[in-house]
Amino acid sequence: MDLSSINPLLLLASLMVAATPILLAATGELVVERAGVLNLGVEGMMISGSVLGFVAAISTGSPWLGFLVAALGGAGMALVFGILTQFFLSNQVATGLALTLFGLGLASLLGQGYLGVKAPPFPDWHIPLLSDIPVLGPIVFQHDPIVYLGLAIVAGVWWFLSKTRAGLVLRAVGENHEAAHGLGYHVVRTRLLAIMFGGACAGLGGAYLSIVRVPTYADGLTAGAGWIALAIVVFASWKPGRLLLGAYLFGGVTVLQLNLQAAGVAIPVEYLSMSPYIATILVLVIMSASGAPGSLGKTFHAAR
Amino acid sequence: MNDPLLRLSGLTKAYPGVVANRDVSFDIGKGEVHALLGENGAGKSTLVKTIYGLVKPDEGSMTLEGKPFAPHDPRAARAAGIAMVFQHFSLFDALTVAENVALGMENPPPMGELAARIKDVSETYGLPLNPSRIVGDLSAGERQRVEIIRCLLQDPKVLIMDEPTSVLTPQEVEILFETLRKLQAEGTSILYISHKLEEIRALCDCATILRLGEVVGTCDPRETSAREMAELMVGGTLHVPERETKVEGEVLMQIKGLSAPSPAEFGTSLKDISLEVRAGDVIGIGGVAGNGQDELLAALSGEIRVGQGQITFQGKDIGHLPPDARRTLGICAAPEERMGHAAAPDMSLTENGALTARKRKNLTKNGFINWRAARGFAEEVIETFDVRTPGPNNAARSLSGGNLQKFVIGREILQDPQVLIVNQPTWGVDASAAAAIRQALLDLAAKGAAVIVISQDLDELMEVSDSFAALNEGRLSAPRPARGLTVEEIGLMLGGAHDMEVAHVAS
Amino acid sequence: MIALEKRPQPSQVWSLASPVVAVVLTMIAGAGLFAALGQDPVAALIKIFWEPVFGPYNFFYLPQLLIKGAPLVAIALGLSLGFKAGIWNIGAEGQYIIGALCGAGVGLAFYPMEARWLILPLMLVAGALGGFVWAMIPGLLRVKFNTNEILVSLMLVYVAEQLMASMALGLMKNPEGMGFPGSRNLSQYESASTWIDRSYGMHWGVVIALIAVCFAYILFSRHILGFQIKLAGQAPRAAAFSGVSPARLVLFCLGTSGALAGLAGLTEVAGPAGLVSIDFNVGYGFTAIIVAFLGRLHPVGILLAGTLMAITYIGGDVAQSSLGLPGAAIQVFQGMLLFFLLAVDVLTNYRVRIGQRSVA
């Protein structure tokens, strides 16, 4: 065992990278849930995004196109969920599970020819001046653009939800869909847009795993990241600021256990690998689910 | 008032199996307070939803200030100058007052400015409100203010009010009427929906009466007696429950210092409630909605468990017992919400019968349900209480509100309870069914059971109760004999001013 | 314009017809999928649905039907209890793994003692108990801390997989296995094998699944507990009013489904699978979710749905070996089936009205 091989600077820097896919997926799901919809298909959309983005990035040679395709793919999958739950009034829990099962199958079908292929390089940005700051520079300002995009999306979602009229309507729809309908707001339309945004974010998160973080495609690549994203939304009490904290906490656990594995700590690898999941359970236990949107998970049908 | 502001002509709207509105026409003049009268199910709601753009009529048309008016959604209606205060509030509990108001406006100003205007307008009209409070923490009366302010900020031409006083104390009603008169003086027309005749006589210039979707009369309420209007509304004469005088019975249930937190997020906790329940007694518990009615019923039925000694039945502590054990002892209850609380909407009436009656009617043996007996019980309820349904295999949700209510009340009464607690037993039920339900409650008491009637309908409580108590913010006033109570005294009790009357309490 | 209108009560006809319609729609969509993969769609469908049951080699495939169907039916039955009550155990895969580990652990501990009358029953108990305990974790957390059981039960799948990996490579590793990962082969250890008749595919898991179907049927048609489960799912407040204790129901539903999943895992590991290895679990716990819904959460329906799903597994293998159809295509196919089912299901509670509204 050699703990001194763990460089705290690198650890903190890689924490931001490790947190990014989950941050992206969780931010999308947060918007969906604030609109009153529980989409348990995050894992399925993420893994579909990871394979679609990867395939697109390999075939075009452009990681950026990969991310675009992943976002579109995630949104498309989410649209299936949206149509089923909003027009066919299907149970959201069951439909979300179906989306996950379908997505896992789809990913392993599409990914067959790409197992173990290496993703095209996706360079980091060294933000001028800021990245030269000692200590802080390498930790915060020397990452790839998607890390910053993720942060920008969280900030954007915060601004949208708390400062804009459309955000207020979205929260109203999630809080009490009957009343929102009574005031003349389009419940289904609002929710469909939120669902598709959530899908796009999950797709991006998945693609980040396959294009940047791993960077290759493997079956079951997401390994529950989508579910952890769902847990982090609960942890965050549906607030974007705390979401960031949750994702970084989780990123920290992941990075730390990977570093411990690499350092050859006397704990068996399997038990270290379990730790992110156990940490997630602990977090869920400590945080009781308060502040959930009033109409979360309920089916809306405009009667009379 | 020659030039009508809003004219409805020939509005017809049919739903499968029922015509909600048939050829409805009337005018509302500028600055007029126009009453729309009718029983539950007469088509009032459909009509106002049509005006508000939530329902599209099958036939007929409307004009507003002489121009054709056909709003395709509520926003269009609001833009044209129609505002509405809903009966069941269209508010968002987790949002602030200001956010709620903003949602009801087409082009709200920035939040800071809006908050200032809310304060301003609310004080002008005597309805003070703090714009930054979370709506879920407000009382029913305050919540209504939010709705009204939301409407007023848009300078509406027509303000629609759907049963606004059902959640208010008599004193609050007076304040509301002041506000409405002020608005009227400023030239706003008001469409006032109610079935409370005295209110309409006090407030309205003109009344249109609906029955079964059709206009059955128009009158000047100040010159028409309440009785005439009632008969137009009901289409016949009413049966008023009769009751025999009786002797005071033994104490069946004793509630002492009952305190319990509400299980609901924005609910009302019960605080130190005491009450003696005697055989043969009907105790009426009044109160404005949201003052702990649901919680009180839940504490008595066993849905909420309470501390030791807080509820005793025939000398035995029962506060810790679950609902089934209490039923076995003879304590039955019927909650306010029929669909989903008193009954499971998607289950058959047979299953809904077994829902509460399995212990007292011996419908289970070693945990196995005797479906034949359960069916028999459901049939008995249907038969005895004149529930209109093809049979016990039909789902509860296929019944109309009034019929399901008869089923729910009948289900409890036929179990021969010693103590029966009901909450809003005739809410949304037509007048003849309501009379039948009240009669059944009185008959049960006459047989020696104790009945606790929780209701927001003071007329109903005065009709059935021997003694009357009021709930206010989870506290219960000391009960007083119902006979001889004046409206003013009741109002004070509802408003929470019970302590000043202590000297009067007779029991 | 097309509008949905709530039926006064659920349609009996559509409740039975919707799974059939969903299967047909999935076959059509599946044909499209197979065509897109460059296969002859009809040939692929025949390989998947006809060949295993009626084809010339069905003597080989039919025993497989029992082997694949039994765990699906047993797990789906357990899940259906919770799903009816609105309690979502989606970590059956983890409970399946832990059941297998506990049962196998007992069997391996007795090796090489021969006492089938003692060891096999002990293993069954250990398997059920293992799954039960694993499911009790989300159950107790939900009851005590109101923790979301969906997420906890699912997280525990990943924990269980890691545990199994550690067992297969460590504690339970076969000392005579020449370094290969995996335990001793239990199906070859007479006292621990769950096989009854290997040539027919008959093992204790099949028996358990069939008994469970009967018990579940009686529970839902006659017993108050079944009634309460249904009630709690349809109208939670009415259930509380009726006197159902939500906590007890959560523990009962999760515990029972965990025990059934654990039994399925144990009978698999000491029978068809034979040993504890890294790739022991193949997703029965997740496919069972589809089975439960396809079977309308009804015991007999689940039996039929489990059989159908087992056919697609076997047929998928057939199509893979004879047509080169990718194995994952079957997974997509199963996912589509659930989508179609959920879509068609709307007709049970709503009817479609077309062109009824006219604008005034």
Image: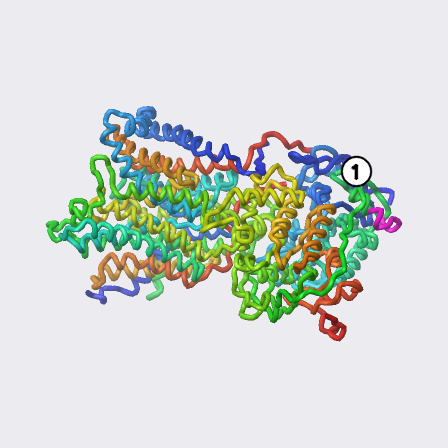
User: Is residue A193 part of the magenta span, yes or no?
Assistant: no
Task: Identify the residue shown where x is 66% and y is 45%.
Answer: B385
Name the chain letter of the residue that bears numbered label 1.
Answer: B
Looking at the image, residue B438 sits to the left or right of residue B224; the answer is left
Asked if residue B348 is positioned above or below residue B423 in the image, the reply reads above
Q: What is the quadrant of the C terminus of chain C in the image?
A: top right
Q: Is residue B284 left or right of residue B223?
A: left
Name the foreground residue: B78 vs C289.
C289
Compare residues C98 and A36 and report the one nearer the observer. C98
Q: Is residue B476 left or right of residue B34?
A: left
Of A18 and C283, the residue lying toward us: C283
Q: Residues within 10 Å of mark 1 (few under 14, many from 20)?
A: some
Quickly name the residue at label 1.
Answer: B25
Which image quadrant: the N terminus of chain C?
top right
Q: Amino acid at mark 1?
A: Ser
Q: What residue is drawn where x is 31% and y is 52%?
A: C131
Q: Position of residue B140 (x, y in %)?
A: 67, 59
In this rendering, does residue C222 appear at all?
Answer: yes
Q: Secondary structure at mark 1?
A: strand
**Span highlighted in magenta in the image:** B221-229
